[in-house]
Image (tube, rainbow, N blue to C red):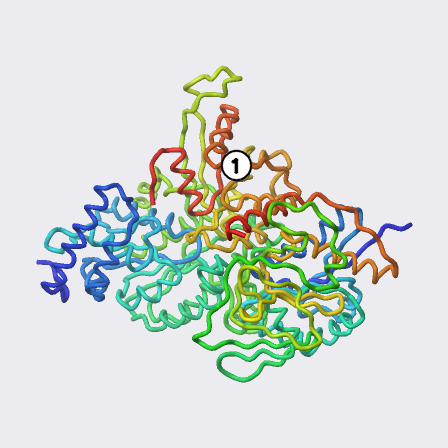
Amino acid sequence: MNRLDLRIAWLYPDLMSTYGDRGNVIVLQKRCLWRGIDAEIVPIILETANSALSNCDLIFMGGAQDRQQKLAGDDFLHRKGPVVKKMVEDGVPALFVCAAYQFVGNYYLPYQGEKIKGAGIFDLYTEHPGDQGKRLIGNVVAEIISDQLSACLPARQVVSYQTDKTIIGFENHGGYTYLGPSMKPLAKVIKGNGNNGKDGFEGAVYKNSIGSYFHGPLLPKNPMIADWLIAKALDKKYGKKIALNPLDDTLADNARNAIMKRLRI
Amino acid sequence: MRDNGDMSFLDRVVITNAKTVSQTSTGLGIGAGETWPGELALKLRPKIASYFGKQFTKGVILVVGTNGKTTTTLMIKKILEANGNRVVHNATGANLLNGIVSSCIRQTDWKGNLNADYGLFEVDENSFPIVLKYITPKRIVILNLFRDQLDRYGEVDVIIEKWQRVLEDLPMQTEVMLNSDDPSVVYFGKLVKGKVTYFGLNDPKEYLKIAEHATDSTFCPQCGARLTYEGIYYSHIGIWHCEKCNLKRPIPDVYTFPKVLDGLYNQYNTLAAVALSKSLGIKESLIKQALTSFVPAFGRQEEIVVDYPTSPADGGIRGAKRKVKLFLSKNPTGFNASLRTIIELGAKNVFLVLNDRIPDGRDVSWIWDVDFEMLPKHMRTIVSGDRIYDMALRLKYADVKIHVESDLEVGVRRAIVALPTQETLYILATYSAMLDVRKILTGKRIG
């Protein structure tokens, strides 16, 4: 059999990459390479043609500052968003974090001004709670409840208080996100805020794609999510189930555990 | 007689009382960087800062920017003092308004008079607009703007906007020294009324081969188009221009000076201090003389010689002195700069300490923006700190082999004992981690 390979699209690495987003891409790539799967990171910038994007097998898009968000937002809404929507509908796995998570929804309602249209890839919307609403910042502990992910999680040696569904991240967002009826939450919050600080859920799953507020970054401390995305990308590309060799994730277990202890869980 | 500004009897009473607080706390060994005499004085007399601002006979100098404030300020202090000036400056970590006021209180006599020529203060990014409400400086040095801890400082763009607003309001008399190689810093020069002096590097030999990841400002601060770089020195610092609106890197007025400290970033700090000093009429020969014996600030390439016995296996010999060099590394650009510098210095042993206490920022995501991949394979790499496993995980994904030391004190001692006599241990640590390391090495707490 030929060597397996994946092309990982990284949307707007120069505009939408703040505070550790690169960690998600590094983890996806390394976890492929360590298993002998070739993985190329394809930077998708404003000038990139849509064909380069639609050739990819996995998509990542991260957070942004306001100014950069405007530049990327325009391009995403009119050019790349429709391509990503089609890919997500077709089952190409994607990960959208922070600003990207808000972008793929139906709209964002700022504190002042009009609704900003989203790409409508995920059925969700985000609202700013106003100047009295608090920004949601801090370490978060959650349990994966998405059936799709749960069904595929490998059994792992459970360290101290963690179950094999525990995920940990750091959130920092002003917008509160609410899921529509066709969306499933990724996880149930145990400590922290999650999507909106009210309904107790974090993130969203649609087909093989995930949205999350964990910019921590999400994947290094939660490698089972990275492996789920990689497995889905391989399934889709090669049309069959390909088992992933297990990797030593002791350091990730320890890193999660340190936060659990800190938060007294 | 000195002009006392609008100091009232009450101001004097407040200063005197705050001074008592300051001396008591110093006497009790609570620490040098304490800021609560200033906090107390500001509570009672909010305008006390503006009173102090007017007391300096030659004026106030402010130094701002994400990285390099402490080193640059210390260099300026050396130069001004060598030129016969009396200088009041704020200690490391006391760079909010309360810290500035505290440092003034400490210098006053019992009548509340400062008796100083210059007030020289490094100012925190968020506090800069607040400080400018009370103090109209004679000079402002703006070093650079990089992404820092998001949860502490917010987004770089938000800081830039706030600074733009306050810089516009400054009078003609305030001159500014700007880094010509940082696009958003240069754009501030378009907004101020006073004279602008640029400092920067003209040295194509130092261009990076590959751009670093931790880059923020590659878009034009004037029109938003992507900038074109002829060469990048580090992060987004380099020789840039905008093809769309023609904004370009100005030719620097000050661009060369003999090396004072290792690392390209320190060359910028040096050029900034030189530009400032020259603007005050100080001769280059005197500047050179003042900087020849420059001793770095706390944790900024600070060298500590320790005298631990060798391990019992090696006979437990005393008197084997070993060198430790401390590099405060608290954000992606600073960390990359530290890594590059120690690699250039031929480091073989590096000790990385990551904490997430309030002065460090609670969010450690930024370590994924640091290019640890540059660490050479032969480097002995040890990690420790409150977020030891986050750091270990980052290095694992950079294919760096590591030793994990969960107890910082034990780890530091072990690393020193294991050090061959001729080698140096390079410790790169975040702010609170650096305080801990210094305490372990010197037995004293500073800052």
Mark 1: which amino acid?
Leu
Instruction: Say which residue appears at 54% left-offset and 36% top-offset.
Output: B405
Does dot 1 land on a helix, a strand or a loop?
A: loop
In the rendered image, residue B51, in percent from the top left (x then y), is placed at 19, 63
Residue A93: percent from left, percent from top: 75, 64
Above or below B194: residue B291: above
Q: Is residue B317 above or below residue B405?
A: above
Horizontal and vertical percent position of residue B132:
31, 66
- The chain identifier of the residue carrying mark 1 reads B
Q: Farthest residue to the right: give it.
A: A1
Please state which of residues B222 and A101 is positioned toward the viewer in this rendering.
A101
The answer to which quarter of the image holds residue A212 is bottom right
Does residue B373 appear in the picture of this structure? Answer: no
Q: Residue at x 61, y 77 (%)?
A: A125
Give the residue pinned by disc 1.
B345
State which quadrant residue A7 falls in. Answer: bottom right
Taking the view exactly as shown, the residue that stands out farthest to the bottom is A114
Left or right: A246 in relation to A178: right
